[in-house]
Amino acid sequence: MPDLLSSSQIGDARSSAARYEGTLNSGRRKALGQFFTGLPLSRLLAAVAIDDAVSTVIDPMAGHGDLLDAVAERAALSNGHMERLQAIEIDPPTADMCRQRLESWSYLVNHLLIRAGDAFDPRASDAYLTKGYDLVITNPPYVRYQTLAAQNGDVPQLSPDEIRRHLGEIVGARVPPEESLIWGAIIEKYSGLADLSVPAWILCAALVRSGGVLALVAPATWRSRNYGDVIEYLLAKFFRLEYLIEDTQPGWFSDALVRTQLVVARRLTLAEARVPLSERRVSDAVVVTVKVSPSASGNDSLVGSSFPDENPEGAFSTWLRETRRGRRTEVQGLVSQLNPLSAVLEETIASGRRRSWFRSLELGAGAGPLFEKEQQSPLSAVPAAIRPVFESVTPVNLALPDVLGLSISQGLRTGCNGFFYADRVDGAGGAIRIRLSALFDNEELVVPAGCLMPVVRRQSEVTGPINAAQLTGRVLDLSGWVLPEDSEIVERARHLYEREGIPVPKVMPLELANFVRRAAEMVYTSGHEAKRIRELSAVKTNVRTTGTDRFPRFWYMLPAFARRHRPDAFVPRINQGIPWIEMNDDPPVLIDANFSTIWSESSAWTRFAFRAFLNTSWCRACMEALGTPLGGGALKLEAAQLKRLPIPAVSATELAMLDAEGRALAPTATSVSEAVDRFVLAKITGVPQSDSRIGELLKGLKSLSDALCRGRQRNGA
């Protein structure tokens, strides 16, 4: 056999692919989700995913062939031979390039099949093996649903509804009949607002045979994203998660906003998968998480310095498997952690039980306190990164926020901040002068005071507890005002307003009406989309025509503000340092979607209690561990992650104490008192506050928070 790695044919094919990638239009790439994996990362994933049993492989979203090229190379290095190497790529020119590239490996493969088409199109899926594949490997496209719905670009793409329908047909023909009900429910229930990666994950998972491997390139946020719950359940239900391989600063993709994670999981047998999650036995199976730092790379390999030999990826794969067996060795640039698979399943149950579809599919999962089964360890409630701190004491009192009556969501999304947000300049009484956004050249106009609501828009406006009197930000709330030309529609619906006890909207003053008319025709550019403001996807949904049972609403009217828009407390979704929860004013003002929001309907949970309780060393360490490090070193903290925050149950009397502590906190405070820290840790562990173990635990939590924060910075460890 010739030296494959120096083969001129293979090298020329790779060079052609690289040149082709450089010619792609950035807007078109975004519309199609064409962000290719690259050969170094593909080699790493292929080495971990392939074993001696792999003979049939498919990449349903193949791009120009990085991953399959690496798979073929790995098979050649193992002196192996492949039965089938198959690719689907939606973009015809890119599919042609993939074909040219992979033909270099045709001598190694009995059946090399490269097809241009949509992976969700039944015409393309006719070539999928009914029995499934030994390995399904891909980098799913992350295309927003709005882009799919708009049909941008010159490549025909299926609509979200078509994708869901075809996905059901493809999956239904390939999964065992005993599993079809659950797969069908997953396909039916995933959010219509999810990006293309969600149905892509489902498709790939369904194509894996029993005992086969699923290997994916994913953002590290895949479990915490708003629409990731079905994916988390899918992997827990039908797969055994084996490896999670993560980058660290500055990351494998220098322009990526979030960290990257390689996900490798093995398909369960039918007998294993049919057991409900809550009834699966605790085993010694583990999930290996490995963080790969830049110091691991070398010699054109992401782990070349960690394993300085001719086959670094192969050595990395061997090291991973030994680590999974409990035989860990220290290697330069690699940090490994073993998490019990049962703990991962418990986290899935805890997260999913809030969903009605989950409860219907997993009878017995329950909706009570976390970890109520005897075989479940209370330590499973603790984020994996924090568990090592609990060496001398075990948590006994932890639950999820919703169990304790706390609600968590996201702040206000207007759909077009350039129109709906302004700054208060001056004025009193019934008329206020405001300054419009840069979209309208920062012009000023006078509007009725009643159509303005104070709002916290960005972090720079938060210097301590919110004081509405000091805020300049305003939301243009026109729910009580209409354009003169819309007044006749409103008048015809007067009885509907009266029936609901809602004042009939007034006609806008001339200056305000002229501004709204001008805004309606203003072209707003967001990414590759250029539309009039009233036609923006998140604005036109404001429109509601009148009927027999509802009053009308127009594009310039925001929907009624919800409690999540006026929370008791909030935290930035993007944090440079360790997260700090801040409290809202009383009455609460509007909080923008730049923040995750927290509130309770219980009067015992005051905003002061929130400020003291949620800023304890325990909560801040958990938030640091639950959040997602971003490419620039910040920490992303979404509502979905905060909903996993394990906290102790506290009584009304104890909340009154926390209220007093919160009132005593200085406006510029960056930490709570040690007494509050000790109180919370004592509640969690059942150990007296004065016990030395509480002090050790507190010290460990603070040290860990600092270490995690430093680790995500560009100059971190």
Image (spheres, helix red, strand yellow):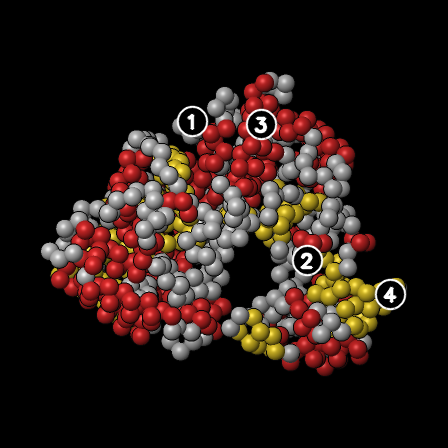
Q: Earlier in the sequence, mark 1 or mark 4?
A: 1
Of badges 1 and 2, nearer the viewer stands 2
* 496 left or right of 248 in image: right
Q: Is residue 601 visible?
A: yes
Q: Secondary structure at mark 2?
A: loop
Q: Earlier in the sequence, mark 4 or mark 3?
A: 4
Per the image, the residue denoted by label 3 is 699
Q: Secondary structure at mark 4?
A: strand
Relative to 501, residue 25 above or below: below
Q: Secondary structure at mark 1?
A: loop
* Residue 702: percent from left, percent from top: 58, 32
Label 4 sits on what residue type? Gly
Quadrant of the rendered image containing residue 314: top left
Q: Earlier in the sequence, mark 1 or mark 2?
A: 1
Instruction: Name the residue located 49 percent from the left edge and 61 percent from the top edge.
Output: 193
Per the image, the residue denoted by label 1 is 374
Relative to 201, residue 616 above or below: above
* 392 left or right of 458 in image: left
Quadrant of the rendered image containing residue 349: top left
Per the image, the residue denoted by label 4 is 427
Label 2 sits on what residue type? Arg
Q: In the rendered structure, are the residues bearing label 1 and label 2 in contact, judged by CB atoms less than 8 Å apart?
A: no
Q: Earlier in the sequence, mark 3 or mark 1?
A: 1
* Residue 100: percent from left, percent from top: 23, 70
In depth, the one of 144 and 37 nearer the eye is 37
The extreme right residue here reads 429
Marks 4/3: CA–CA distance: 52 Å
